Amino acid sequence: MAIVSTIAKSVSRFLAFGEGSQFSPFHVRKPDAGFDSGSGSLVVNGGSCVWKQNSPRESVVTVRESEKRYGGMPDVSVIIPVYRGSQYIAQALTSVFAQRFTAYEIIVVNDGSPETEKVERELQPYAQQITYIKQENGGPSSARNAGILQAKGEYIAFLDCDDAWHPSYLAEQLALLRAEPELDLIYCDALLIGTSPNAGKTVMEINPSRGAVTLESLLKLDCSVITSCTVVRRQCLLDAGLFDEDRRCCEDYDMWVRIADRGGRMAYQHKVLALRRIHPEAITADPSYVIDSQVAVFRKLGGSLPLIPVHQAIVQKQIARCMAEIQLHRSKVDLMAGNYTEAATAVRFANTYFQSRKLRSIEWIIRVMPRTVRLFYRTRNKWYSGVGQEKSFRSSDEVTFRR
């Protein structure tokens, strides 16, 4: 029975690959190809709606009513990109309006959303409290950059449209930044919600941040910055050259590494002050796309930054890890397709990097009883698809956040 239990655990860990990946940003979606944003746009203008024909690539309407709340220039500019997720944007905005710290402005960037009509319907009640930017689809980097360039605050707080904040989020993050004037960036932990077996855990439970945030710790992935939990000096983002608009996945990681390379100081707190939503449209639904993006980012960093030899070695090791994880992903695809020999071979190739006894056992199990492993995988996926229940956000302190 002990052998059977060990085999079951090994198979389960193998099949769970990618779901808690240390480098898998939940918020990024794979872009739709060939989307036509149309020739007209609905633009919020001081509470009214006007139709703007043949608008340029970027249309900006700044609403001044919100300035009455903080009495002038905001300290923080909250940037919320929207592509999909129209059903969540009101929750995100509600969580910002519930903040105890009020010297902020909100910039919502519609990044050529195919749900524009729904997005603007959801935004209409908040028309006098936000700045609304509408542009052709350029990806998350382009959307965030548009918000940064429009921002008036000294600090930028990023929030994805499907995430939300605790009412004390901005107050506590700003307090830490102001207590340490040399800090450029602070991030915190977040509770995972949504349709996933990881719902109810925190991001740092799955991907812990350990030790000081340095260039080396970021390259090693000992520290993982959570973008929707990040407050950063605007000038720091400008000095780093903004987000790389050629990157549509892992672009945030690329930014944090470049900031660290320039000597930017970062820190984190373990307190849970946000909600991170996992849902079927998240990029984690396509592990191969995530891993390919990791490889592209590491290759870019290795080729563009003046890294010392030890850091170059870390980058090359991370690329090797990614290539091994690609083989593990392919082994699952082959397993489900009934290509059992190819599945076992992919596991063996992956293990040239991992050097794991468990993976050697997995290779043997796939070769000896492949149909059993395939049935286990299929049953597990069906079970997980049924257990994930969406946990809705409420702004009260005691319900959705751990103490």
Image (cartoon, helix red, strand yellow):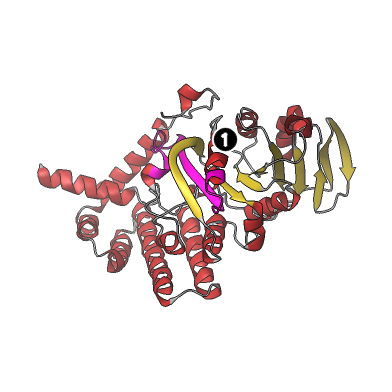
Kindly indicate the quadrant of the structure image that contains residue 145. bottom right
Measured as percent of width and height from the top left, residue 338 is found at 34, 55
Q: Looking at numbered disc 1 in the image, what kind of residue is underneath it?
A: Ala
Measured as percent of width and height from the top left, residue 349 is found at 31, 68
Other residues around mark 1 within 10 Å, as few (<14) / some (14–19) / many (≥20): some
Measured as percent of width and height from the top left, residue 271 is found at 44, 37
Kindly indicate the quadrant of the structure image that contains residue 191. top left
Instruction: Identify the residue position indicated by label 1 in the image.
Output: 171
Q: Which segment did they paint magenta?
A: 178-204
Residue at the image position 53 percent from the left and 44 percent from the top:
179
Q: Residue furthest left?
A: 1
Residue at the image position 44 percent from the left and 54 percent from the top:
23
Front residue of this view, candidates 61 and 157: 157
Q: How many marks?
A: 1
Was residue 185 drawn as part of the magenta stretch in this picture?
Answer: yes
Front residue of this view, candidates 402 and 37: 402
